[in-house]
Image: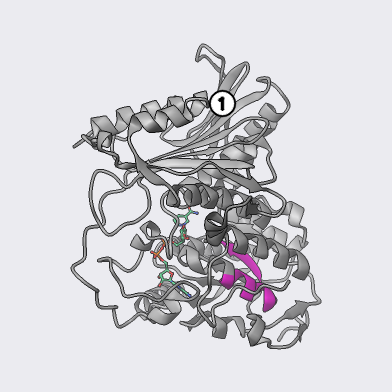
Amino acid sequence: MSSRRRFIQQSVAASTGVFYIAKTSWAKSPGDSINVAVIGFNGRGGSHISGYKGLKKEGVNVAALCDVDQKVLDRGLSGLDKDKIKAKGYTDLRKLLENKDIDAVSIATPNHWHSLASIWAMQAGKDVYVEKPVSHNVWEGRQMVKWARKLGKIVQTGTQARSSREGIFAAVKWVQEGNLGAIKLSRGLCYKRRASIGKAEGEQAIPDTIDYDLWCGPAPKTGLTRKKLHYDWHWTWNYGNGDLGNQGIHQMDIARWFLGEMQLSPIVWSVGGRLGYEDDGETANTQIVYHGYEKAPLIFEVRGLPASKDSKDMDKFKGAGVGVIVECEKGYVVVPSYGSAIAYDPAGKVIKEWKGADDHFKNFINACRSRRIDDLHADILEGHLSSALCHTGNISYRLGQQQNPDEILEKIKGERFAAESFERMKEHLAKNDVDIAKGKLTLGPVLKFDPVAEQFIDNDAANAHVKPKYREPFVVPEAV
Ligand SMILES: NC(=O)c1ccc[n+]([C@@H]2O[C@H](COP(=O)([O-])OP(=O)(O)OC[C@H]3O[C@@H](n4cnc5c(N)ncnc54)[C@H](O)[C@@H]3O)[C@@H](O)[C@H]2O)c1
């Protein structure tokens, strides 16, 4: 152990779900190296590995890799080996976290592991970069914030658009200075093709390279009822959060960023369906979420089907497909990417443009050294709030009932922006030959939410989704 690393280990308290608590008494100075471990890298984690490899000159070492799939682990280690990087390999993250040489972990596991892995890592003295959504439910996201603050850990959310400083950050600032007057509506869009994942016949065999008990972790351990174990979990409620909590969280975050809201919304409802095909997925592929913030609503639209049946194109609205549109009194701003924004006057003439994206991993490392939360572009609190806006939207959807379009319109017509979104959703589904007249759309209840307690008001069914039951011993610690 190097002299700058002095860990004071405290008790192992398995009964409370506390893995162990370690405190660091050191701060990074510019010359110190930082040893990073990447956890989960079948897909996105690969970008984490290359991101940190690219920071070698900044003193960053990819010192360990961890994946519950031995095949993925071997692939990762041999990739590093080719670059003459000797990293340690682990399949069990608890073993990795015992390694005192690791300063920070970078988590790209499925969503149901994000909170527990992050909190265990913080308790073991590590800083954390965690992918979006940072949580799988509302409660555990807030637990992450509490643990980060209690232990003084640096926790970055994997919403890399937050590192677009000369791009989106500058546009947010410009709008918040009032250059377009007040915001009337912040609209997030996730028009991204999501094809059927097929239908598995019966329970599927678990590949023998995967420790399935560890893969399931805090979530229920059920038989595998989809063809592909990796990635397609996004579309099942036990492990994923649909495209709202997958691609959509990036745009949800940007939409909330413009509004400057630092609490969850007091009113939320959602309408949608999994339409156009029948497969093993459970989450909506077509959805609208309405967040009734007092100053201006935030509306989110998900479309996984193409612009029309057999088309390869996706819809666009005001120039954005996966993006954000901020409607203001004197014009609007479109954020069509992770690194740019354009302001228009009411007639659609461009007024101003912003562009630029910085390295989100580098920002994390810089904050690990400075120990200043304010240096982070996407602190865990931001990650929690934006992830939870996806969760509360999904909760309304999951509590909903199938209704026909006229009944739905009758109930939402008082909210003109939402009614307009719904009309466009109807047109989009008609172009995909989806017959919603027969009640295939699900309208969720209008839910009242207490943004301070982060609980729904007088609604046990909704609150049951705020905090689930965890599977022992993978329990997100209650006490902070
Ligand atoms: N920021 C971005 O732009 C971006 C892009 C893509 C994905 N993501 C996020 O990254 C995460 C991973 O997505 P993916 O598409 O790579 O999923 P994936 O299923 O392809 O990969 C997940 C990997 O994690 C491993 N894993 C599961 N449980 C583990 C555990 N307990 N310990 C160690 N490894 C474990 C799996 O074996 C797999 O190799 C998701 O949360 C997703 O939302 C972010």
Q: Can residue 435 be seen in this view?
A: yes
Identity of the amino acid at label 1?
Val
Q: From this view, report whether residue 250 is shown above or below residue 349.
A: below
Question: Which residue is drawn at the image coordinates 54% and 54% (left, top)?
Answer: 462
Question: Residue 24 is drawn in which quadrant?
Answer: bottom right
**Coordinates of residue 350 in the picture (x, y in percent):** 53, 18
Instruction: Name the one closer to the observer, 459 or 196.
Output: 459
Instruction: Name the one closer to the observer, 459 or 10.
Output: 459
Assess mark 1: CB under 8 A from ligand 1?
no
Question: Residue 238 is drawn in which quadrant?
Answer: bottom left
Q: Name the residue under label 1.
A: 333
Image quarter where ligand 1 lies: bottom left
Dot 1: what SS?
Answer: strand
Near mark 1 (Cα within 10 A), the count class, few <14, some 14-19 or many ≥20, is many
Instruction: Name the one closer to the observer, 437 or 321.
Output: 437
Q: From this view, report whether residue 152 is shown above or below residue 101.
A: above
Q: Can residue 357 be seen in this view?
A: no
Question: Which residue is drawn at the image coordinates 29% and 39% (left, top)?
Answer: 439
**Coordinates of residue 102 in the picture (x, y in percent):** 63, 78
Question: Which residue is drawn at the image coordinates 68% and 20% (left, top)?
Answer: 181
Q: What stretch is highlighted in magenta?
A: 116-132
Q: In which quarter of the image is the C terminus?
A: bottom right
- Outermost residue, top direction? 347
**Coordinates of residue 85 in the picture (x, y in percent):** 50, 76
**Coordinates of residue 293 in the picture (x, y in percent):** 64, 36
Q: In which quarter of the image is the N terminus?
A: bottom right
Left or right relative to 141: residue 319? left
Residue 126 is a magenta residue: yes
Q: From this view, report whether residue 320 is shown above or below residue 439.
A: above
